């Protein structure tokens, strides 16, 4: 079912040189799709696409900074013009952000909003006229579990991801009559370079949290949800259950979030970033 859903379809994936974006791109190619892989990191992108050459010329690289509206517009428009349609747009590029809010500068705020929120807005803005003319298409925005649950010490990240979730859910109902589907992906921890990528500054080597799902498994879940037409694709099960509880009776998870805040406060005071991410293992009361 999933393979038939994507075979021969034209897909654009941003943030495609690593992590979820790369895993989704590889899975789409395995399902027979034509994939435009877009990323800011030109060198890494060249290496990735060279490795994917076995897919009969269906992998096409595009060096793109999603914070630049003109570059995103060209990416989406050129993909549709070159391949005859735009069937799927995966607005996946983004950056993490876990830090004490009092230490965040306005430069931090501008960077994360430009990348995580404006990057998605630019993609949607570019894709909508094309998909409306077609009378079909599917926009898949990468949100986060932090767009469903307000994790402490992630106020910058939550601001952007709550925005992505709200926009996606609103568009899902608005665009249904135009034949356009909209999904938002809300993962918990997934193995990715995001854990070593600060909002500002150079990427460093950093281990993913112990509970991080392999990117390939995340891609399988995402594409199954997209093929099924799911609006919110939230995983894995433990964070998904946390979201369910927060959505229905938020007071049931207050103690959990307070404990996460306490553990992160201690971890930041010690400069122990590994402990910051372990803090989400705090016990959830039944």
Image (cartoon, rainbow, N blue to C red):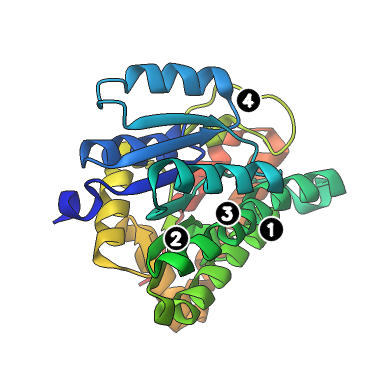
Q: Quadrant of the C terminus?
A: bottom left
Q: CA distance from mark 2 to mark 3?
A: 9 Å
Residue at 51% x, 20% y: name it.
44
Residues under labels 1 and 2: Cα distance?
26 Å
Give the label on residue 203, or none: 4
Q: Position of residue 82 (x, y in %)?
A: 44, 40
Residue 233: image location, x then y, percent? 36, 62
**Above or below — where is 120 with respect to 272?**
below
Picture quadrant of residue 232 = bottom left
Give how far across and how far down residue 265 sits, in percent: 68, 49
Q: Secondary structure at mark 1?
A: helix
Bin the neighbour count of mark 1 within 10 Å (Cα to Cα): few under 14, some 14-19, many 20 and up.
some
Which residue is under mark 1? 155
In the rendered structure, find residue 181 and report the number of the disc placed on it: none
Among the two numbered marks 3 and 4 on one chain, the one whose residue lies closer to the N terminus = 3
Q: Secondary structure at mark 4?
A: loop
Task: Please report whichever mark, 2 or 3, sits nearer to the chain's N-terminal start.
Answer: 3
Residue at the location (30% across, 68% down)? 229
Who's the residue at 64% across and 55% down the image?
122
SS class, disc 2: strand
Residue on which disc 3 sits: 123
Q: Tag 4: Cα neighbours inside 10 Å, few (<14), some, or many (≥20)?
A: few
Mark 2, residue position = 139
Tell me, yes or no, if residue 209 can be seen here.
no
Q: Nearer the viewer, mark 1 or mark 4?
A: 4
Q: Residues within 10 Å of mark 3 (few under 14, many from 20)?
A: many
- Marks 3/1: CA–CA distance: 24 Å
CB contact under 8 Å: marks 2 and 4: no
Q: Nearer the viewer, mark 1 or mark 2?
A: 2
């Amino acid at each position: 079912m999933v393979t038939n859903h994507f075979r021969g379809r034209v897909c654009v994936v941003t943030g495609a040189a690593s992590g979820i974006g790369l895993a989704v791109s590889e899975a789409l190619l395995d399902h027979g799709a034509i994939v435009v892989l877009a990323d800011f990191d030109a060198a890494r992108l060249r290496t990735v696409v060279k490795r994917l050459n076995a897919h009969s010329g269906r992998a096409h690289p595009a060096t793109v900074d999603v914070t630049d509206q003109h570059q995103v517009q060209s990416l989406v428009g050129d993909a549709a013009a070159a391949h005859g349609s735009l069937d799927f747009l995966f607005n996946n590029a983004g950056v993490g952000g876990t830090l004490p809010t009092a230490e965040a500068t306005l430069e931090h705020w501008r960077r994360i909003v430009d990348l995580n929120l404006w990057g998605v807005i630019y993609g949607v803005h570019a894709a909508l006229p094309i998909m409306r003319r077609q009378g079909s298409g599917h926009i898949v925005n990468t949100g986060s579990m932090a767009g469903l649950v307000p994790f402490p010490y992630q106020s910058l990240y939550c601001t952007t991801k709550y925005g992505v979730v709200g926009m996606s859910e609103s568009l899902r109902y608005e665009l249904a009559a135009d034949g356009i589907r909209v999904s938002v992906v809300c993962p918990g921890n997934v193995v990715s370079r995001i854990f070593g990528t600060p909002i500002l500054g150079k990427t460093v080597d950093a281990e993913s949290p112990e509970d991080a799902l392999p990117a390939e498994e995340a891609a399988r879940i995402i594409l199954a949800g997209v093929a099924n037409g799911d609006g919110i694709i939230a995983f894995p099960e433990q964070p998904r259950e946390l979201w369910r509880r927060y959505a229905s009776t938020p007071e049931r998870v207050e103690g959990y979030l307070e404990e996460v805040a306490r553990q992160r406060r201690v971890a930041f005071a010690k400069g122990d970033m590994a402990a910051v991410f372990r803090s989400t293992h705090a016990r959830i009361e039944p």
